[in-house]
Amino acid sequence: MIRPPALRPGDRVAVIAASGPPNQVNLERGLLAMEHVGLKPEVFSAARMGGTEYDYLAGDDATRAAELTAALADPAFAAVFCACGGYGMQRTLEFVDWSVVDPARPKVVVGYSDVTALLEAVAVKLGWVSLFGPMVACGGFYQGPGEYDFDQLMRLLFTPAEVRELTFPGFRTVVPGVAEGITLGGTVTLLAASLGTDTSLPARGGILFLEDVDEELFRLDRYVTQLRRATYSDGVAGIVLGTFTDCGDPRDVERMLVERLGDLGVPVLAGADIGHNVAMQTYPIGVRARLDTEKGTLTFLEPVLTEPAQV
């Protein structure tokens, strides 16, 4: 995988809405937080639009896709930050023109939830490392410096050499062991929704991260089972389970996940502080790493990002 350069103060970065419309008050606060650490955010038009055809989409599909394409292709931007998730990324990806994006000029792409589909896509289409991390108008990001998830993301973006390992204080060992592989995964429902498309990134040989939100237990069971039956999880090296907020009684959720994933014969860790409605750590997609489910650590075997590009 191609690792993008780390960021520097003064870098121009794109802020897009390729899924749903962001809360405008939170967006403005998130932009101020970015400026506080020296970034120069430029907001694309869909992030200012309310729902057009449907109230759950930021503008129309063509606009979102054109702006995502432009943000990825324009060498003036050092990174692409998603304003929020929601729904719409799968529709957006139908119309992205990957041919105009130079794989040899990687840039950081950041987001989570619905953005899982984009992180898979940049890995498959461009071979870029990306970040499953906080979004500009969501969670702790817009509260800026001093908020755990904002600070963790900025530390990784600006000083990646300092971020050599993720530790999970509240972890639980489901299946003991050590595994090595390429980090991948994201929100379960989005991984399942990408199956059969040309942007799905199978888990073979990988350290698979899974999380989700607002899914009834039987629906979550259905999606995880779909990933199994579709051979998505065949050959996975290890599994990290994050938050499953509002998916039912946590004990029932974990019992189902253990039953569905514990028989794959690979190390499995639960209780990672990554996902929805939690002060989250940032999880890279596309980096070689070692998972130790008894120590509760994910150690990066290479820097997540490279040294900043020279002017």
Image (cartoon, rainbow, N blue to C red):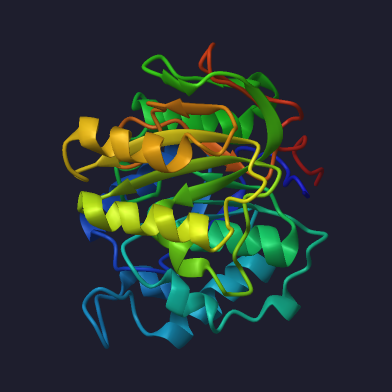
Image x and y of residue 57, in percent:
30, 76
Task: Name the residue located 38 percent from the left edge and 58 percent from the top edge.
Answer: 223
Task: Name the residue located 53 percent from the left edge and 48 percent from the top edge.
Answer: 185
Q: Is residue 59 above or below residue 71?
A: below
Task: Name the residue located 56 percent from the left edge and 56 percent from the top edge.
Answer: 119
Q: Is residue 214 visible?
A: no
Residues 7 and 107: in front is 107
Image x and y of residue 191, in percent:
48, 59
Q: Is residue 54 above or below residue 30?
A: below
Q: Is residue 16 left or right of residue 196?
A: left
Residues 185 and 98: in front is 185
The image quadrant that residue 70 belongs to is bottom right
Marker count (numbered):
0
The image quadrant that residue 163 belongs to is top right
Q: Can residue 66 be seen in this view?
A: yes
Image x and y of residue 267, in percent:
57, 27
Q: In this view, does 245 lie above or below 218?
A: above
Q: In this view, does 121 lie above or below 137?
A: below
The image quadrant that residue 253 belongs to is top left
Image x and y of residue 236, in percent:
63, 43
